Image (tube, grey):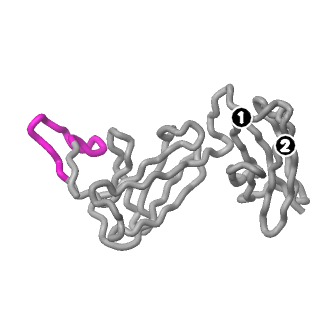
Amino acid sequence: MAFSIPYENGQYVAYLDNVLTTRLSFAVKLIDDFTKKEQIGGIRVEIKEIDKKAIKNPGGYYLFTYLKAGNHTVSINSDLYFPQELTVNISSVPDLKGPVSEIVLIPRPVYPFSQNATLIRGCVRDAASAPVKGARLRVIGRDMETVSDENGSFVFYLSGIESEGEVSIESKKNGNTRTINVAAKEFQIVSAGMISLP
């Protein structure tokens, strides 16, 4: 497949009669899980094995060109989102006219949530009160999961919770599991909680 662009990362000056044609191997569309729109802030999208960075086009797609057939690991890193990796087999992309994968980015606790967002914020700590990185957390009864960051911090962004309701959060790390209940009236804007793992 070939595509035409008037410029690439500011390295080319385009004139009306100039078109740069390149063979597209794969494209990635990043979606912010909180806004359901394009991601915000700086982000690095690259092929891990060969340290090849993606080209971002004006439509917000991250493009990889001239990749050899085979498996490639797409690595996505940002200060505002948890890192993601996706393995792509270039020879098995089903739609040669649109080889695009959408990746949903999960905001880190430092993400600039809007002021009217309903959030549950907290911290996972061990028995010695040290932060627990990488603990898996989920809201019981809802399709919501996240992980704690390097400071043990986590955040859930919710909607449709009645003020009299309650949310149960389960935390797991290295076989240890804890559950806490948080009343909705405690987190209409921001609530702090702590989960201790033994």
Residue 8 part of the magenta-drawn span: yes
Question: Magenta span has 67?
Answer: no
Give residue 49's position: percent from left, percent from top: 43, 69
State whether residue 116 is above or below residue 122: above
Residue to which mark 1 is pinned: 160
Q: Which residue is tagged 2?
A: 193
Residue at the far bottom: name it: 70
Q: Residue at x 79, y 44 (%)?
A: 122
Q: Which quadrant would residue 112 be assigned to in this image?
A: top right
Mark 2 neighbour class, 10 Å CA radius: few under 14, some 14 to 19, many 20 or more:
some
- Quadrant of res 93: bottom left
Image quadrant assignment for residue 117: top right
Magenta stretch in the rendered image: 6-21
Mark in the foreground, 1 or 2? 1
Disc 1 on helix, strand or loop?
loop
Secondary structure mostly seen in the magenta stretch: loop
Residue 55 lies, in percent from the top left, at 34, 49
Type of residue at label 2?
Gly
Quarter of the rendering occupied by the C terminus: bottom right
Which one is in front, 155 or 125?
155
Instruction: Please tell me whether residue 44 is drawn above or below residue 52 in the rendered image.
Output: above
What residue do we see at 60% from left, 48% from top? Answer: 106
Q: Is residue 131 visible?
A: yes
| SS for dot 2 | strand
